Image (cartoon, rainbow, N blue to C red):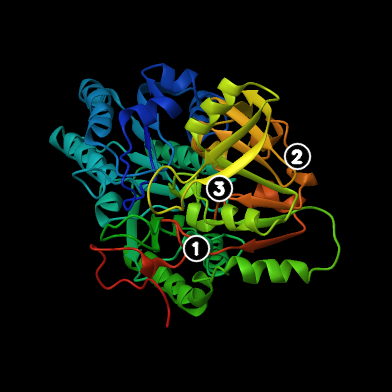
Amino acid sequence: MTKRVLFGGLFHETHTFLSQRTALADFEAMALHRGADAITRNRGNGSPSAGFIGVAETAGWDIVPTIQMAAMPGGIVEDTAIALFRRHFFPVLEAEAGRLDGIFLVLHGAMVGETSNHPEADILADIRSELVARKLDTPVVCVLDLHANIPRKLIDNSSVAVAYRENPHRDAHDAAVRAARILGELMDRPGVAQVHLPTRYVLPPTGVGSADDPMRAVLAAARAIEATDPEIININVMAGYSYADVPDCGFSLSASTRGESGRAMAHLQTLAGVLEQHVAKGYPRDAALEEVLAAIDRLPPGKGPVLLVEPADNIGGGTPGDATDLLGPLLATGRRGIVAALADPQAVAQCATAGLGATVSLLIGGKTDAHHGAPIHFTGRVANLTDGGFELELKTSHLASMLGTHAEMGPCAVIENDQATILLSSRKMPPMDLGQLHSQGIRPEDATYVVVKAAVSHRDAYGPIARASFNVDSAGLCTSNLPRLPYRKLKGKILALP
């Protein structure tokens, strides 16, 4: 008999310290697909939704679509956006519940709403309530970002949660494939339990790359447990998202098993011990620009640009992408061969008015809030004007995990002078794919310095072209120095080591 699977998606990484809210318009700008569009607009696009759809269609399942929503990381999500998801999802669930064999959700795990610390967990709890009320034991599987902050409520109300295992998230599509296959197994053979183990550690994004410890060590130990214990279905190593001021913020572990829950919990405690052994490496220090430039000047000759990574304005972490606290001082040194990108729709409009080839004198960046520097003066030539659309060169990149293989930056302008080439975009875009710059006529490979507004997610794209890379300390709300931030809801958590 053909399996019927309910499908929906609600994806957002929420930075609670930003003053700007994430509105329904932000989802409309990135992904808001109702009904059948949730399938047709995601089929084959490299996203987690595409991973599920591919498994389902290959298996011949009847997909019952509801709504799929995603927005760029940003501030607290307005309740109206969450309410829209609910208005499209739950009526379909209520109408179809008795005929469903499974439910699959693409979530993030670090969404925060105006009136809820964990709206995704609330949704799962309401799904479970509906099923229990009807005396149904329909399996509910969700795929999650590695940066999820996991409350017990999420684990208790899902059958299996499956998280990405790579940071950068080159495996988001594959994680959804794995989750969908697990759902297929559960529909044929139920009987899996989940256990959850939070930790006291809140690690900055710069400290949770999967190629570095502590993540590397804990992930390797988790894979070894899965390989040796046949009862374990899946183990999640959740790095957490440190810029969500919620009680469950931070590093956590979970496992699904067909065996005894106590044995699975013992495995998680073993992994927590591995974390303890390596956790100091999860709190890296970003260096001052002067220190970094001195280190660059000592480098031997080599090919490729030096990356000046600016974690404090990590667009993939939610910040506005217009910080100037690194770019301004760098330009003031008089150094040349600089490539950078800023989200600044006002400056784009000024360039468009001036026209291609015109010389413009602009104040760029630093316009969103008081946390990311002040606007800086830049005089240069308008070298390019485009609509800002581009195809990803890395089809399985971290960026594809967010929006598929096509990206839209809105109207863009490239300005240049004898010091720098700067991409100005109308919408912020995480620097996770070289297609962002190549599509605008910029070759970062030929630069001397490239300013990268990221923490870890840029590595797959920019690592292969770079001569060296340095994390630079600057002003911004994605700082690696977590004690700078005004947390109110964390109790008993460690934000830094002595």
Q: Is residue 311 left or right of residue 333?
A: left
Q: Nearer the viewer, mark 1 or mark 3?
A: 3
Instruction: Decide if residue 130 is in sight here.
Output: yes
Q: Is 163 or 477 nearer to us in this picture?
A: 477
| The disc label shown at residue 144, or none | none
- Which quarter of the picture shows residue 36? top left
Q: Is residue 380 left or right of residue 399?
A: right
Q: Is residue 99 left or right of residue 286?
A: left
Is residue 378 shown above or below 334? above
Q: For the point 34% across and 44% down, which residue is it? A: 75
Q: Estimate how packed mark 2 is, as few (under 14), some (14 to 19) or many (20 or more) residues with alpha carbons within 10 Å.
A: some
| The disc label shown at residue 229, or none | 1
Q: Which residue is mark 2?
A: 443
Separation of residues labelled 2 and 3 (CA atoms)? 24 Å
At label 1, which amino acid type do we have? Asp
Q: Which residue is mark 3?
A: 169
